[in-house]
Amino acid sequence: MSTRVELLQNELAQLEKEVKMERMRTSETTSEIVQFCQKHQQQDRLLRPLTVAENPYKEKKSCAVL
Amino acid sequence: MMGDDKVNVEKLREEVESLKEKIMKQRKEMCDSTLADVTSSISPLHRLQFKAKRTLKGHLSKVFSCNWAKDSKHVVSASQDGKLIVWDSHSTHKIHAIPMKSAWVMSCSFSQKSARFVASGGLDNMCTVYALQSRKDNTYTSQELMAHTGYVSCCKFIDDTDLMTASGDMTSALWDITTGKLKTLYHGHSADVMSISIAPDKRTFITGACDATAKLWDLRDGLCRQSFAGTESDVNVVVFHPTNLSFACLAELQDEADAGADSCMCLFDLRSDNKVGETRAFRFSFTSMDFTKSGRLAVVGTSADPSLINPATNTGPSKMICYDVLKFDDKNATRIEKAHDHTISQINVSYDGSALCSCSHDTLLKIWTAGHPRTD
């Protein structure tokens, strides 16, 4: 069981690492996210109806052979 | 000495607070825009429509979790009825109905390389892996992964040999299922870890916990790389974005008499270490979510609408809300009303991105695909 002091020391050690992080600007990083989404949107099969060939859930039309 | 310890604790606490403030300042300096700012010139998504193509009936009680196999055909679900069911989502047939030792299940997962294994975890403090090909009558060979001292809230396969768990004992763990041994234990959260999401490149993972933070970890070296604060209370769900550069979380909000908002969805950007989007739910909670394959859409499941709960059955309809991730705009989100007759517990997009599986406390699973907005 960690003591209160130990827990705080661990937290401090972790924060000392995190404070050193080199952060980028959100305007830069978010534009990459936007580009990715736009690039892959066409192939995103939940953003457009599936073609008959792609759709394993299509209602099967049955032909009655008399 | 008691006195010395008290002084130590105070001093450490001050140092911790001062560093936290420093980090907040550094983040703020780098936050020169939100995602919505950058996308103001992008046209919103066209109108969306989802159709429930299949309903998977068979569980006798609340379904708590569901997960697609890599073949985008099989789905595993876990229920309070004590069963893990593996379904063929195309035919709706039950391929396996595995009796679990403990019915107190919270999460299930399908192996991510082949469809050979499923795993479940819950209040028995362990994660059990079942070999589907080993079936003899109705029993399956299983491997119990034991080391946690608290409940397993979430289990996720990385491939066919490695699996991760999140636990109420405040840790998350990486397991080798071929040996049943713990490979790495990740320490850092100060409260129950509720969710885990593995990065698309499988080098890192995110956890969300009741200490109101989400953390980014390096899978190999076991170290916590970043901590994300900015949610007021418990983080219940975390999901990596397909870009590998951001993630979303669902978190509870503190009770505020005025605001009335109960939960929120936040989008965090890894490299700027900032929150770049947020949307709130009023009166109901966001319970589950997943991204579509391009990352453009976030589909969120909700709890039963409190205003529509039938007092006789104590159930009420829930909905799915589809947010355009690039706009994070509540007004233009597509709402699928009455998606289920009770709280939705999980939403999972298939590996090939063509279908969505939802599972609910109403005992059902539903398979959804995109429909024609005009006709369906």
Image (tube, coloured by chain):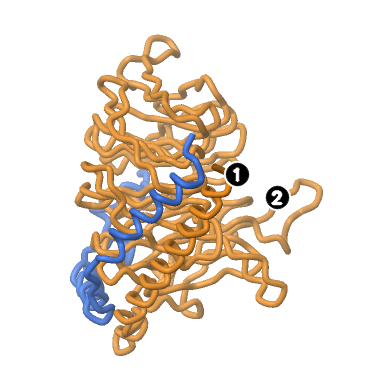
Chain colours: A blue, B orange
What residue is rendered at 46% in x and 66% in y? B17
* Secondary structure at numbered mark 2: loop
Residue B220 — which label? none
Indicate the quadrant where residue A21 lies. Answer: bottom left
Left or right: B193, with B35 as reference point: right
Left or right: B143, with B333 as reference point: left
Answer above or below: position of B364 versus A13.
above
* Secondary structure at numbered mark 1: loop
Residue B109 location (% of width, % of height): 38, 36
What residue is rendered at 37% in x and 44% in y? A62
Answer above or below: position of B194 versus B113.
below
Residue B315 — which label? 2
Q: Nearer the viewer, residue B320 or A9?
A: A9
What residue is rendered at 52% in x and 49% in y? B4
In space, the residues marked 2 and 1 are separated at their CA atoms by 9 Å
**Disc 2 residue type (three-letter):** Thr
For the N terminus of chain B, the quadrant is top right
Residue B284 location (% of width, % of height): 63, 63
